[in-house]
Image: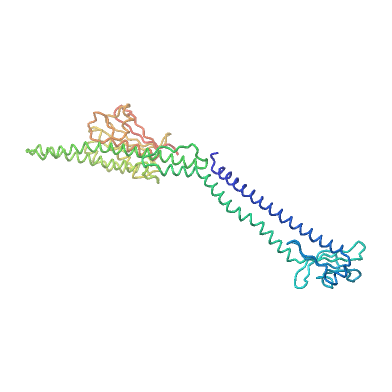
Amino acid sequence: MNSLRLRLVLLLSIGLGIAWLMAAWFTHVESRHEINRLFDAQLAQSAQVLLGTTRHELHERIEHGEDEIAVSHEYEQKLDFQIWSGGNLLLRSTSAPTTAMAGDQEGYSETVLNGQSWRVLTRWDAHHEFMIQVAEPLVGRESLARHITLKMLIPTFITLPILALLIWLGVGAGLRPLKQLKQEVQQRAANRLEPLAMKGVPEEVVPLAQALNNLFSRLKQAIESERRFTADAAHELRTPLAALRIQAQVAFRSTEDVERHAALENVLRGVDRATRLVAQLLTLARVDPETAITSFKSVDLHGLAASVMADLESFAHLKQIKLTLAEGSPCIVPGDADQLGLLLRNLLDNAIRYTPAQGCVSLTTLHNTDGIVLAVQDTGPGIPKTEREQVLQRFYRIPGSKEDGSGLGLSIVQRIAELHGAKLVLSDSESGHGLVVKVIWPPA
C-alpha cells in the first residue's frame, strides 16, 4: 500500500468506525435503560389506575382524599381524571377540577390548570354515554426529554477526544513515509547527491522524489563540470603565468638591450595570451546552461555578421586575410544578440588566426532545406576528421599547432549553439583546403 491517500483514508475510516461503534454502544445502553424506565413508569401509572378502580367505596375515599397513592417511579407522574355523563361529573381524582379540563371533542389537547400546562386526552365510550378525560402535566415530559438528550450527549463527549486521538495517530501513521523522506533529505551532507531510494515511497510523493533525484543529478553534473572547468582553467593559466615569470626574470637579469627588449616583447605576448584566455574563460562561464540568458528575441544573423566582421577587419588586415560576407537576405532566428555575437566573433577569430597570410575567410547566411545556415569558410590547414570531436572539448588543441590559443573557441561556439537550439557541423572545404564551420537552425 504505497498510496498516501489510500493509507490516510483507511486509517481514518478505521478510527471513525471504532469511535462510531463506541458511541453506538453507549447510546444503545443508555437508550435501553431510559426506555425500560419509561415503560416502568407506564406500568406504575397503570397499577395506580387499577388500584383506584378496585377499591371499595370509591366515592367515600374521594370525599375524604384517601385515593392518593404515593409515586413509586421518578418518571411516574400525577394523573388527573374526570368521568362525565350527560354533562354531570360522575367521578374525578382528588386534584382534578370540578369543571371539564378540555372540550368534549375526542383527542389530545393542551390546557393550563393551576398555572401549569397539561396534556389532556378526551375519550367517549362506544355508546357515547360516558366521557373520560385524563390529564398529565407537561413539565415531566420536558424534564424527561432533557434527561434523555443529556444521556445521549454523554457518549459523544466521551468519544470526541478518543476520535481526535485516533485521527492524530492515523494521520501520523499515514504521513510517516513523507517524514522519513524529509529526514533523509535533511540529514544529507552537501556532497551527497546520489538519488533517493524509491522503495516504499507513496504514489503521491513519487513525482516529488523523482524531481529531487533529477535535481541531485543536475547538481552533480554541474559540480563535476565546474570542478573540471576549475582544474582545466588552473592548468591553462599556470603555463602562461610561468612563462611570464621566466621572461620577466630574463629581462631583469639581462645586461644587453636587445635581449632585454626581446624578453619584454615575450612578456607582452604572454600578457595578451593570458588576457585572451581569461576573457574566454569568462565568456565560457557566461554561456553556461545554468546561468545563460534564455529570453530570446528575433535576431538578424546577416546584419549581426556584418557588424562583427567590421570589428575584426583590422585584425584580418594585419594578417593580410581577406574577409568577405556573401550577399543574402535577412536570416531571422530567435536568440540573444550578445551571445550570437560571441559565436560569430569566435568563429571568425579562429578562422583568421589559423589561415595563413594572403588567405581568405568568407561568411555566408542562407535558407535551405536544412533550415537557416550560418557558414564560415577559411583557407587554412583545416581539422582532421579524427580530431573534430575532440576540438569541441574545452582546452583541447590539435598537437603541433603553432598558433597561440587556449582551445576554448569552438567549445564556446558549441555551447552557444546548443543554447539556441542549433547544431554545429565541421566539414572540409569544397576546394579541399581549409575548414567549413556551419551553425544550422532546423526549420520551426
Q: Which quarter of the image is occupied by the C terminus? A: top left
Viewer-nearest residue: 370 or 340: 340
Residue 273's x, y, as percent? 22, 39
Q: Which quarter of the image is occupied by the N terminus? A: top right
Examine the rendered structure and indicate whether residue 105 appears above or below residue 405: below
Which corner quadrant of the image does residue 424 belong to? Answer: top left
Tell me what residue is drawn at x 19 percent, y 37 percent: 242
Viewer-nearest residue: 105 or 330: 105
Examine the rendered structure and indicate whether residue 82 appears above or below residue 31: below
Viewer-nearest residue: 438 or 148: 148
Which corner quadrant of the image does residue 92 belong to? Answer: bottom right
Which corner quadrant of the image does residue 144 belong to? Answer: bottom right
Residue 353's x, y, as percent? 25, 35
Horizontally, is 257 left or right of 288 in the view?
left
Colouring of the image: rainbow
Viewer-nearest residue: 412 or 137: 137
Residue 4's x, y, as percent? 53, 43
Tell me what residue is drawn at x 61 percent, y 54 percent: 158
Examine the rendered structure and indicate whether residue 121 appears above or below residue 310: below
Residue 141's x, y, as percent? 73, 63
Tell me what residue is drawn at x 81 percent, y 60 percent: 47
Horizontally, is 411 left or right of 212 in the view?
left
Q: Give the mark count.
A: 0
